[in-house]
Amino acid sequence: MKLCIAKTVAVASLLTGTAQADLPVAYDIVELGALERVPQQDGSRARQSSFGYALNNNGDRVGHSFGEHLVINEREVNGIIIREEATLDLLQPLDFTDLSRTITPEDRELGFGTGELGIYATSVNENSIISGYGFDNEFYPVLNENEDGICEETNEVRQELRRAYYFDLNNNLVQVPTNYTVGTPLGSETEYFGTAFLDSNNDYFVGYGGVVTEKGDCDNLETITNRGMIFDVNTSSPVFIGVLEESENEANAQSVIRGINQANQFVGWSHKVEDEERIARAIIGSVGSSEITEVTGLSGGTNSFLWKINNSGSYAVGSSTKESNLNLLTAFYYDPILQVSEEIGYLNEQFPYSEAYSVNNDNIVVGVSQISRSPINYSAFAYDIDGTEGMVDLNDLIDCDAGWTLSEAREINDNGWIIGTGTTLVEQEDGQFSGEVRGFLLIPRATEADRSCETQVVSNSGGFFNPLALLFLSVFGLILRRRKA
């Protein structure tokens, strides 16, 4: 596997009258690197891309990158084992701290599916265990009654499903298998069919799984419903949470856990039906308790989502619709003690879309906000809950000659480090520079930024969106679309 070595560029922020006093006075920026891609048909270099997604307090950071990957597949034909090799362009999980680590296995057991959808790294805990999910094809038998009324296997069905995994320090890739039995009725043990890890602490991985809620004739698989999942690292066993409101239509009774802190408090969302329409409501709960609490979000809103809760448990952040903006999401923070939600706002009031993805113990929030429509563009933001000012565009807090456009800030740790994705200038084979999507890491520093040069906008940033967010949220069918040009 050929790698692109990460490079460090000195970047800083300027403390102005519009920046909060508790925000760092400056940042350094680290380009996180990317995998080499399969060359284009004419043999020229394909543009690289990577996406920064999660980090821990030790500075470990993970994400994903499109890159070439040697796939080895063996099959038997007339008693002869045929070994096939192919180099594919695949979205792969990355340990940005050490790009030489290979998480993607050299087979088709994880990450491909029918559409070669890739594998995602969504979290890294304080023990440096990486977790996420890929895609897999699983075959399961179908039973039908014969003329004697006996159920027997008649054919197989292929199901493409998500497969949760974790990757330990010894480079062991552990996948979570399905737990489904054909031909037996549902019992006390939960059966599930497909899983995904979205966040973790040292004791638990959280996300969701496809719980089997109904079986049909001959006890065949009938209905699968996504439910929030808590996976115990020590026992290697999952527990699935309920929903805010049960429904005869299982599509209206789904839940997901999106984040967990070190105190084992978790956040996410659950479906429910209100005025005969399916909506999503943010939820908060604790490991070991069967209760989940509804968080309605902003006043007059129909849908709300929580992405993260800080380790102190003082604030959770997410996005919500509101009475004056029912078509787009608005970033907000939630105080679990006071049970109050507060709007964070937008970088540009003309384009009222924003989402808050993470908050640290200093109550600094990071996320994404739309800034223009033609072309459509998004910017990474920071917001101090304890401050008196509004959102700060992180692009205004870096050197103007850095050659970066920061599109989204995905997570902030308790040291104030921020991971996200943007576009940076990269020299091409013809000697010209053009924009390529890269994961970035922002590290606070003490010296001020240079904002004296002319503003340089990096191309290829318009319409940028992390593919994981789009793919994951489409599962639940409720995320509102971003405003089109």
Image: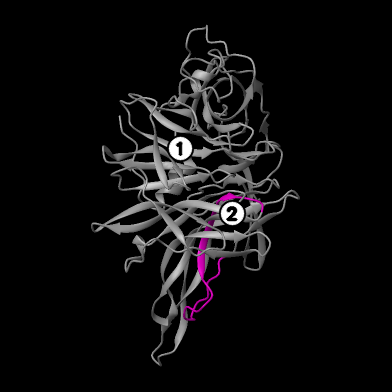
Query: Residue 318, relative to residue 167: is it above or below?
Result: above
Q: Residue at x 66, y 24 (%)?
A: 7
Q: Residue at x 61, y 31 (%)?
A: 417
Q: Is residue 135 visible?
A: no
The disc placed on residue 264 is: 2
Q: Is residue 195 visible?
A: yes
Q: Quadrant of the C terminus?
A: top left
Query: Residue 275, relative to residue 25: is it above or below?
Result: below
Outermost residue toward the left?
275
Instruction: Give the left or right position of residue 138, taking residue 215 as reference.
Output: right
Name the mark nearer the viewer: 2 or 1.
2
Q: Which residue is mark 1?
A: 356
Residue 180 lies in the magenta-colored region: yes
At which x and y percent is residue 138? Answer: 53, 64
Outermost residue toward the right?
170
Q: Which residues are magenta?
A: 178-202
At which x and y percent is residue 338? Answer: 44, 46
Mark 2 lies on a secondary structure that is: loop
Query: Overall secondary structure of the magenta stretch?
Result: loop
Looking at the image, is mark 2 or mark 1 earlier in the sequence? Answer: 2
Mark 1 lies on a secondary structure that is: strand
Q: Residue at x 50, y 48 (%)?
A: 117
At which x and y percent is residue 61? Answer: 64, 38
The amino acid type, in three-letter code, at marker 2 is: Asn
At which x and y percent is residue 461? Answer: 45, 26
Quadrant in the rendering for residue 424: top right
The amino acid type, in three-letter code, at marker 1 is: Ala
Quadrant in the rendering for residue 58: top right
Query: Residue 283, relative to residue 417: is it above or below?
Result: below
